[in-house]
Amino acid sequence: MTQRMSNLLYEVLQLSETDRSELTERLLESFDHLRSDLDRTTDTEFRTELDRRQEEARNDPSILIPWDQVRDMR
């Protein structure tokens, strides 16, 4: 780690948790151009599936499994 980076890290760690979180989000966004179209497609498909399952659970709560049972399935 360069001295400049070390200094930056020290300064960042002095920030509030909220500010560090926002900074982290912005740093990650700065790498967004490196994500492949496949990653974006997978994210979209995953979110679509999550939305579908959420809607299904809302329409028929009887399909839900209590956490204690799910945890014990391992």
Image (cartoon, rainbow, N blue to C red):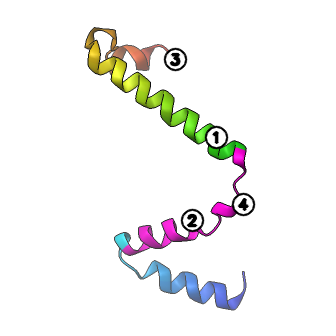
Identified at 56% across, 70% down, the residue is 27
Mark 4 belongs to which amino acid? Leu
Distance CA(mark 1)–CA(mark 4): 14 Å
Provide the secondary structure element on which disc 1 rests: helix
What residue would you read off at disc 4?
A: 34
Which label sits in the foreground, 1 or 4? Answer: 1
Specify the principal SS of the magenta part. Answer: helix
Number of other residues with Cα within 10 Å of mark 1, as a class: few under 14, some 14 to 19, many 20 or more: few
Q: Could you tell which of marks 2 and 1 lies nearer the N-terminus?
A: 2
Q: Earlier in the sequence, mark 4 or mark 2?
A: 2
Q: Position of residue 1 (x, y in %)?
A: 72, 80
Task: Give the magenta-colored segment's residue range.
Answer: 19-37
**Chain-order first, disc 3 or disc 2:** 2
Q: Which residue is mark 3?
A: 74
Give the labeled residue for mark 1.
41
Q: Which mark identifies residue 29?
A: 2
In percent of width and height, residue 28 lies at 58, 64
